[in-house]
Amino acid sequence: MRSLIVGTGSYAPEKVLTNADLEKLVDTNDQWIVERTGIRARHIAAPEQATSDLAIEAAKRALEMAQVDPKDLDLIVMGTITPDYPWPSTAALLQGRLGNKKAFAFDVSAACAGSLYALSIADRYVSTGVAKRALVIGAELLTRIVDWKDRNTCVLFGDGAGAMVLAPSTDEKRGIQSIHLHADGSAWQMLHQAGPGSRNPLTAEMYAQGKHHLFMNGREVYKFAVRALEEACRETLAASELSPSDVTWVCAHQANKRILDSTLERLEIPESKCWMNLEKYGNTSSASLPMTLDEANRAGWLKPGDLILTTAIGAGMAWGAGLIRW
Ligand SMILES: CC(C)(COP(=O)(O)OP(=O)(O)OC[C@H]1O[C@@H](n2cnc3c(N)ncnc32)[C@H](O)[C@@H]1OP(=O)(O)O)[C@@H](O)C(=O)NCCC(=O)NCCS
């Protein structure tokens, strides 16, 4: 049995921060940001909003499309590295807020690959009949951990949430074909948040050293990403004995337009097949993949039978790719 995505939803906070706004905060300019990343604006959560507030909006929209009552969910799995609290999981908070009593719920920590990891886990439960209805979320408030004085990173990220509802497919050809995940923990330092945690507990010194901020070696991440994404896409296509030319649409994590363009070029997939929304949202980490899928879906791009290639990469390093017969 395959699992099918029967509903998608997304939510971006109201406030928009443009590149021109950023020029007032750090020494940067619109041209540099657009040329290097493709980003023109990003959405920023209101001070009173936490990750579950974004997640619940996306979840409600996906559940409505799927015509699934939140009380009927058997599983809620959320990719996030910016949870409401260190614990319990934001997925558990969401279960409570949705009025659901029977789903088991947990978060997955795989940074920007979080929703792909979460989708892969939910797919295993649904395709084996253990769960009949699963909610998969990617929700992130990265702007809370970004150093707003660091032009290398603060221009790249935005807040948002995306959701997918999975159910068993009644047509054996449709649904998730396979998802292939990878990790390379030897590269963890490329992209990380050093504290607070058991290695660097919450102290005034840790805070003064800025260890609570997101750290990234952009150049190293870029090189790693381009190679890893191409390999993962080829691996997932090969598993179904398909080639890049069979792909109808690409709905991928939006980290950087140049990373996506170069992945597409290596795969010889035309850019016109890839839904891009980076210019509006920036990199929304785990939210980006389901937000992209939802936009493409609601725009009428995704038709039953279409072959969707998806891929994502994030801190860990953690990455992967998957194929979905819509
Ligand atoms: C971050 C990224 C856009 C930087 O582009 P780059 O071409 O590698 O640029 P570099 O880091 O080499 O910096 C080039 C110069 O621009 C400067 N610069 C960095 N950020 C800047 C900004 N926002 N505005 C203006 N100049 C900036 C640097 O200080 C550097 O100046 P220098 O040469 O005087 O030292 C790019 O490396 C990238 O996209 N990496 C992947 C990031 C990513 O996707 N992360 C998430 C993965 S999920």
Image: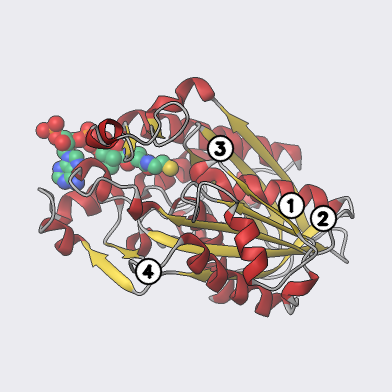
Q: Is residue 218 above or below residue 111?
A: above
Where disc 4 sits, the SS reads loop
Where disc 3 sits, the SS reads strand
Q: Amino acid at mark 3?
A: Trp
Report whether 127 appears left or right of 178: right
Where disc 1 sits, the SS reads helix
Q: Give me the C-alpha separation between circle 1 and circle 3.
A: 17 Å
Which badge, 2 or 3, is on the more N-terminal residue?
2
For ligand 1, the image quadrant comes to top left
Depth check: 322 or 123 in front?
A: 123
Report whether 144 appears left or right of 252: left
Report whether 270 appears left or right of 64: left
Which badge, 3 or 4, is on the more N-terminal residue?
4
Q: Are marks 2 and 3 in contact (CB under 8 Å)?
A: no
Q: Are marks 2 and 1 in contact (CB under 8 Å)?
A: yes
Depth check: 16 or 319 in front?
A: 16
Q: Amino acid at mark 1?
A: Ala
